[in-house]
Each structure stands twice: as C-alpha cells, then as structure tokens.
Image (spheres, rainbow, N blue to C red):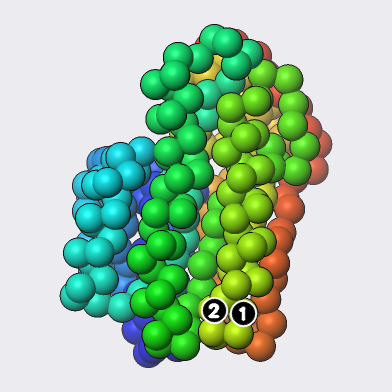
C-alpha cells in the first residue's frame, strides 16, 4: 500500500464515519469524507478533505465519485453512511422507502460501480462496509432497515468473491447497538450502562485492525455485540 494511502469515508460527519476519519488520520491516511455536513472543525486535522453529498441521491453520488476518481486513487473505502427508520412497513410512504433503501443500500452499489474498476486496474484495494446486527436477524418493526442491511451483506459477500483474484479485499462489520447519533429521533436507544452499547471508537479500532491484516487474507465478516444487551424506550433527540 502507498506510504500515505488515501481512504474514502462515507457518513463522515458523525457516528462511526466520523470516528473512522479520526482513526485513519491518526494512522497517517489522507481521508476524503462524504456527508451532508462538513466535520472538518471536529476533526481538527490536516489531510482531510470534505465533499458535501446526500448519499440518498444516487445520481449525485455517481457524479461525485467519478469526479473524485478523475484526480486521485483510493486505497480504502469505509462505507459507514446510514440511518434507521423503524415501524411496520405500511407506516412508510413510498418516498420514505425509496430514500431509506437509497441511503442504506443503493449508495454502496453506486460507489462501488466506479470505485471497484479503478481499484482493479491498480491491483489492490480494501472495501469495508458497516452493516448491522439487523443483517443477521430481523426483528419487529425493522422490515425496512433489515431489508437494506440484508442486501448490503449479500452485496459485500458477492463482491468479495468477484474481486478476490484482482487483489481487492472486502470486509463487512456488523455491530450491535452503538452509542451514536443514529438513535436521535428514534423511540429507543441502548441502555445507559457502558456494557449496553459499543462505542464508535471501538468500531473505528476494529476497522483499523482489519486494515492492518496481511494482504493475503480477508476478514470476511465481523459481528460485534455489547456484552449485555439492554434497550431503553422513549423519544431521543
């Protein structure tokens, strides 16, 4: 890998994406972040470049990725963007369904449509997707979110098979409940105790560990859970 490799991080303005940016910058990476809000003031570090983007807009996402690839190469993708809508499927409008699937699933496909061929030409690259425990076991009120995360899991597994002989490594990290802004506006959140939730920095450290493994192996999938699962119910944010 290059002496100062470059990573593309989605969902860079908060939660897991922001923590991943910090960890990668600390590790000597140049980082290009995609999110609606610019987190540069929170990162306070050189080597970071931000591009404002609503990843639910597939056409804009495609244009942005193509423009970025015209001027640089990427060694790593960390696809951390996502948001949750929970409820019975009939509670959602068609527009809400389309927006949720576009952000949580389609954005990964659109990005990889352009990024994977560029990595193949170089013969190397690492793609890390942030999935969810909802990709492993569906739960009540989670039909919309689980549909996207099950899809992302299937995509990452197929992509891993497609790209292995081209020098690309594909990994999926499925966290359980993470203490992050993900739960703002929802009516539930992890319990208050430390053992009830994973921290975003712990996810970022896991990302870093995956990146440090030998290029001759692939960590296909990692499932992370808080030691004690506990949920508090009530409006958040």
Q: Quadrant of residue 234?
A: top right
Q: Quadrant of residue 212?
A: bottom right
Point 27% across, 46% down: residue: 59
Res. 19 in view: no
Q: Quadrant of residue 194?
A: top right
Which element is circle 2 on? Answer: strand
Disc 2 to disc 1: CB gap under 8 Å: yes
Which element is circle 1 on? Answer: helix
Q: Which mark is residue 164?
A: 1
Residue in the foreground of this view, choosing between 45 and 97: 97
Q: CA distance from mark 2 to mark 1?
A: 5 Å
Q: Which mark is residue 168?
A: 2
Counting from the top left corner in percent of width and height, residue 146 is at: 64, 34
Point 37% across, 77% down: residue: 118
Counting from the top left corner in percent of width and height, residue 33 is at: 31, 57
Counting from the top left corner in percent of width and height, residue 36 is at: 27, 41
Point 69% across, 82% down: residue: 217
Point 59% across, 49% down: residue: 152
Residue in the foreground of this view, choosing between 110 and 43: 110
- Give neighbour class at mark 2: few <14, some 14-19, many 20+ (Cα, 10 Å): many
Whether 31 is drawn above or below 233: the answer is: below
């Amino acid at each position: 890998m290059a002496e100062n490799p470059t990573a593309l991080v989605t969902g860079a303005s908060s939660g897991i994406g922001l923590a991943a940016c910090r960890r990668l910058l600390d590790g000597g990476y140049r980082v290009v972040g995609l999110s609606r809000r610019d987190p540069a003031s929170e990162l306070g570090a050189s080597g970071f470049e931000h591009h404002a983007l609503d990843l639910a807009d597939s056409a804009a996402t495609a244009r942005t990725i193509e423009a970025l690839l015209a001027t640089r190469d990427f060694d790593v993708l960390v696809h951390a963007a996502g948001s949750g809508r929970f409820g019975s499927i009939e509670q959602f409008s068609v527009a809400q369904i389309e927006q949720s699937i576009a952000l949580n699933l389609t954005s990964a496909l659109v990005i990889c449509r352009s990024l994977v061929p560029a990595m193949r030409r170089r013969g190397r690259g690492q793609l890390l997707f942030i999935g969810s425990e909802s990709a492993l076991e569906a739960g009540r009120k989670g039909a919309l979110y689980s549909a996207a995360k099950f899809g992302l899991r299937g995509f990452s597994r197929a992509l891993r098979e497609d790209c292995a002989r081209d020098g690309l490594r594909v990994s999926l990290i499925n966290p359980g409940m993470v203490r992050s802004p993900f739960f703002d506006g929802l009516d539930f959140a992890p319990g208050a105790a430390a053992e009830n939730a994973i921290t975003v920095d712990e996810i970022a450290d896991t990302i870093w560990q995956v990146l440090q493994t030998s290029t001759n192996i692939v960590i296909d999938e990692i499932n992370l859970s808080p030691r004690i699962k506990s949920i508090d119910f009530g409006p958040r944010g």
